[in-house]
């Protein structure tokens, strides 16, 4: 396909159009601002960056702090490659906040310290930093492809169970344990617990208890009784199966039928390593 797109000659620096030929980043030198490199003492050229359409229309966003829409941005160097891919979305940086936009130019989200596309298409994890005394800690939330905030950006950990369209959130930050919650995709609260929620679906939730012994408690909303699984570690597999490690005993639980099967630890060690890597890295 031959694309005849020309950027008007009114910029000091231009970058390529993205892979979908919908947006390009351009820049002009801002002679009103002077910055000095603290190491060399040399003056640094300051640029104002713009994101433009093939029609040379500058993309505007509504920021968290400004009353008017903004189309001029500084310090976009770290976002230079972000907009070039073939995906529908790109990010704009403004005063240490990242804003998610469609390649069409429509703004999707408000500003966060970071926004990351999750492994589930159409969902984005948000990040902010909150201060408490001399401590600073990262908190997380979840938005969908429209920017709707499913989970506020205030949790330690977010898990999206896309099979059951629910999100469960761990709220332990600054060594304070508030309630963990289960939300649906409309941000409706489905369940809240002072205990840590290890897993949740539409009909089940598994919470961790440490007293009087370390165990996991399974509650099925279609039944009136609880089911207890002794152990220190819980890993959800799939199809209502979970691995529970209790000392040297490795057991597979069927959360629906509550049947238990002892398994060889060596067979599942690679799974546990893979699970931990995907959870924390």
Image: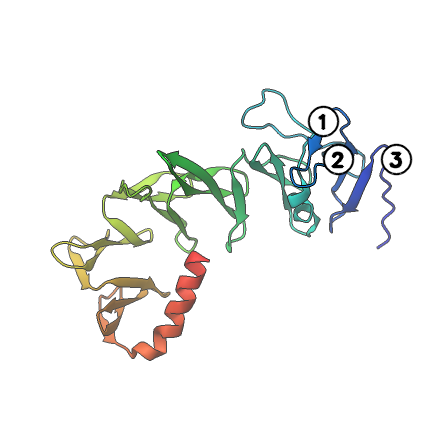
Label 3's element?
loop
Residue 244 screen position, x and y as percent: 26, 66
Left or right, 240 with respect to 93, comes to: left
Q: Please rate how many residues cluster around mark 3, counting C-alpha atoms within 10 Å: few if below 14, some from 14 to 19, many from 20.
A: few
Give the labeled residue for mark 2: 45
Residue 212 screen position, x and y as percent: 11, 55
Label 1's element?
loop
Left or right, 29 with respect to 74, comes to: right
Q: Nearer the viewer, mark 1 or mark 3?
A: 1
Q: Please rate how many residues cluster around mark 1, counting C-alpha atoms within 10 Å: few if below 14, some from 14 to 19, many from 20.
A: few
Q: Quadrant of residue 105?
A: top right
Left or right, 134 with respect to 223, comes to: right
Q: Quadrant of residue 109?
A: top right
Establish if 87 lies above or below 71: below
Please tell me how many numbered marks the rendered image carries: 3
Give the labeled residue for mark 1: 33
Give the labeled residue for mark 3: 9
Q: Please rate how many residues cluster around mark 2, counting C-alpha atoms within 10 Å: few if below 14, some from 14 to 19, many from 20.
A: few
Q: Quadrant of residue 73?
A: top right
Label 2's element?
loop
Estimate the spatial distance between the alpha carbons at disc 3 and disc 2, rounded to whole Å.
20 Å
Q: Nearer the viewer, mark 3 or mark 2?
A: 2
Establish if 167 lies above or below 130: below
């Amino acid at each position: 396909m031959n694309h005849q797109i020309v950027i008007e000659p009114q910029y000091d620096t231009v970058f390529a159009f993205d892979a979908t030929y919908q947006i390009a980043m351009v820049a002009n030198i801002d002679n009103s601002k002077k910055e000095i490199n603290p190491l060399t003492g040399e003056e640094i050229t300051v640029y104002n960056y713009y994101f433009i359409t093939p029609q040379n229309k500058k993309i505007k966003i509504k920021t968290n702090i400004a009353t008017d829409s903004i189309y001029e941005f500084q310090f976009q160097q770290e976002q230079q490659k972000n907009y070039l891919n073939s995906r529908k979305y790109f990010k704009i940086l403004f005063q240490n906040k990242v804003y998610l936009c469609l390649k069409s130019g429509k703004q999707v989200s408000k500003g966060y310290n970071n926004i990351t596309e999750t492994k589930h298409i159409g969902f984005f994890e948000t990040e902010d930093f909150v201060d408490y005394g001399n401590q600073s800690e990262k908190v997380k939330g979840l938005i969908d492809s429209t920017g709707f905030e499913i989970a506020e950006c205030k949790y330690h950990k977010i898990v999206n169970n896309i099979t059951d369209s629910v999100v469960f959130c761990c709220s332990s930050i600054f060594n304070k344990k508030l309630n963990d919650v289960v939300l649906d995709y409309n941000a409706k609260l489905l369940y809240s617990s002072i205990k840590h929620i290890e897993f949740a679906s539409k009909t089940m939730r598994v919470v961790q208890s440490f007293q009087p012994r370390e165990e996991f408690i399974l509650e099925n909303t279609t039944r009136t009784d609880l089911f207890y699984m002794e152990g220190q570690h819980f890993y959800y597999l799939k199809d209502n199966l979970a691995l529970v490690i209790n000392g040297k005993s490795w057991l597979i639980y069927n959360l629906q039928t509550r049947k238990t099967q002892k398994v060889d630890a060596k067979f599942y060690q690679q799974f546990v390593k893979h699970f931990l890597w995907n959870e924390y890295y």
